[in-house]
Every structure is written in structure tokens, then in C-alpha cells.
Image (cartoon, rainbow, N blue to C red):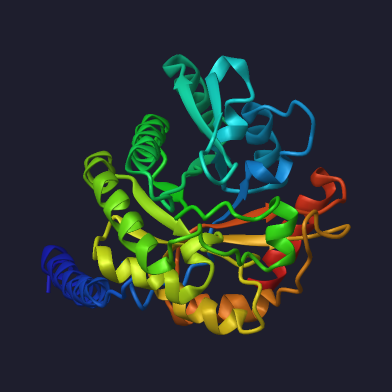
Amino acid sequence: MNRREMLGTAFCAAALASTGTLRAEENEVKNETTTGTTAAFRRPNPLAVSSYSFFRIARSTMEQCVHWAAEMGFSGLEILEKQMYLNPKAGKITSSVVPGGGQMFQTYETNPQYLQELKRIAFLNGIDLCGYATHQSFVHPDKEFRQKNIDTTIAGIETAYALGIPVLRVNTGRWGTSKDFQDLMNNKGVEPPMEGYSEDDAFPWVVESIEKCLPVAEKCGVILGLENHWGLARRAEGAIKLINALQSPWFRVILDTGNLLDDDRYEQMAQLAPHSCFVHAKFYHGGGVWYSIPIDYERVFKILGEANFAGYISVEYEGRANPLSAVREARKELMESL
């Protein structure tokens, strides 16, 4: 056998081996779960930090949050919308009180140049802008009020798109009948409906409202992530009821480990995990601002692993200790659990 024949034989053997590998990989890719990931996917989850973790540092800007995230070794930053607009360069906030419930409703007039500059700074620091957390409420009998919330949610989708962010946090909203937020927390997020209404009335309001946002979300390539954040999604069954009603790949769950206040929180996490596109990992160093609950992150990661969750896990620090040191410690604890 001459040198050319030897090389040809070696090439054919390598090609056959490569073909077998490619076919195996193709089979793995086809083995999708409801999260859209593959069952064979086992790399560590990327870690992000929510800018909300630094919210209590006076006058902290989103640019500072990017630098802190990079310095601490995170891969991504989740932006809290109302926090970004505390910087006048980002645009203008207009606030008004919600009729009937006393909650605050905010709209934003965005400065496009600021968004592009923030995106540039994040890229140069090696930080993915990976989530955009908004507030809205569709739990209200007034159709005009719900439409205002639809409009501001669509504006948030377009802002996320401009920033290159693939997921937008949405809430169902709540009744607003609690005396204040501490009262809501004291009652584990449970509050009575407005007089004359029930949750049976509210679910169709929420479905209809999110339905109106989904075409824009799909066009922009931005997933709407419903957080288990009080209201109709306070418990897993409420969030899953909405997921099942809307049946859209652009409407998933953002699982918040600290917002499940009932004793069966891990069972609820197991229900939510297969529908989740993003996870908030709560920490309460120094004692919680509103409450503290113990969270076993090794157990959480086992639940997420069984659901083949491969996406971002974002630290949401809500404690009374210094955020800069506490967030570092939270990341260390997550890395140890991972």
C-alpha cells in the first residue's frame, strides 16, 4: 500500500467515525423536552445576576450593574426595567395610580441611543443582557386599563429586542386589595378579589391580554416569561393553567425560587421546571427585606436537572446585608451547589 492509499484509507475511517458521531448528535438534538433543550445536554447552567440585587445601592446605574456582574464572574445581567429608567439618560418615567387598587402604573419613554450604548458596554465587558423584567397587571375589570398594560408590555418587548434580550419577565398582576406590600407578604401573597369578582373572572382577562402581546413577542424573538409573582401565578397550578390556555412556544415560565411561600414549594418547583425558560435564585443574606425562607439549592438543581433545564439561573438578592458582598457570596453558594 503506497502513501496515497494509506492516507485515503485513514480519511475514509475518520469520515465513517465522524458520520457515526454526527448521527448520534442528531438523535440527541431530536430528543427534545418541553423546555426546548436536549435530554443529553449536561453543561453547567450559566449564571446571571439581576440588577434588582443592586437596587438598594443608591443611584446605582445599569452601567455599574454591568461592571459589577463582570467583576463578580457572572455570565449575564437581567435588567429590571423600572431601575434602568432611574437613570435620566435612559428616558422618562410617567407614573399614575391604578383605579380601584391603589397600585402604581408606570409608562416609559425610551432613549434609543442609551439602549445601544448599554448594549455596547455589556458586550465589551463580556456580559450577556439575558433578561428584561417588567411590571404589568391584567387583573382588573376595566378593559381600558388592561389595554394600557398591554401597550406598556409591548413597548417592553420592543425595548428588550433593541437590547438583544431574548426573554421578558411578565406578571399576571394582582387585585391590589392589600393594605400595602408588607400586608401582602404577611398573607403569603394571598389577597381577596375586588368586590363582585373572582379568579374565574380574572383568568380570561389575563389570557386575552397576553394573547395580544404574543404576536409582537414572536416577531421580535422575545419569549414572554411568566413569573410566579403573586396574583394568579402565585402557585404553580395558576401559572400552568395559563401556559396550557395559551399554548405558545413564546410563552413560558420564569421560576422564582423565593416566591413559593407555601410548604410544598419544592413540589411546585417540580411542576414549573419543565415549562421554565429562566430561573430566579433568591438569597436573603442579613435577613430578608420582606421575608426569608430557607432554599436548598442542591435540591433545586436536582429538580431542574430532571427537567433538562439548561438556561440561565439569575441571582436575585433580597436581603439586608451589603449587596456587593452578599451577591458574591450567593454566586459562590450557587457554584458549590452546581
Q: Nearer the viewer, residue 42 or 304?
A: 304
Q: Residue at x 65, y 55 (%)?
A: 178
Q: Residue at x 78, y 66 (%)?
A: 292
Q: Residue at x 35, y 56 (%)?
A: 206
Query: Does 37 appear above or below 54?
Result: below
Q: Quadrant of the N terminus?
A: bottom left
Query: Does 215 appear above or below 235?
Result: above
Q: Residue at x 50, y 81 (%)?
A: 270
**In the image, 143: left or right of 185?**
left
**In the image, 178: left or right of 214?**
right
Q: Quadrant of residue 69?
A: top right
Residue 295, horizontal then vertical, whole percent:
71, 74
Query: Does 20 appear above or below 287?
Result: below
Residue 234, horizontal then vertical, whole percent:
54, 67
Query: Does 36 appear above or below 162?
Result: below
**In the image, 119: left or right of 17?**
right
Res 205 visible: yes
Res 37 visible: no
Q: State the count of labels.
A: 0
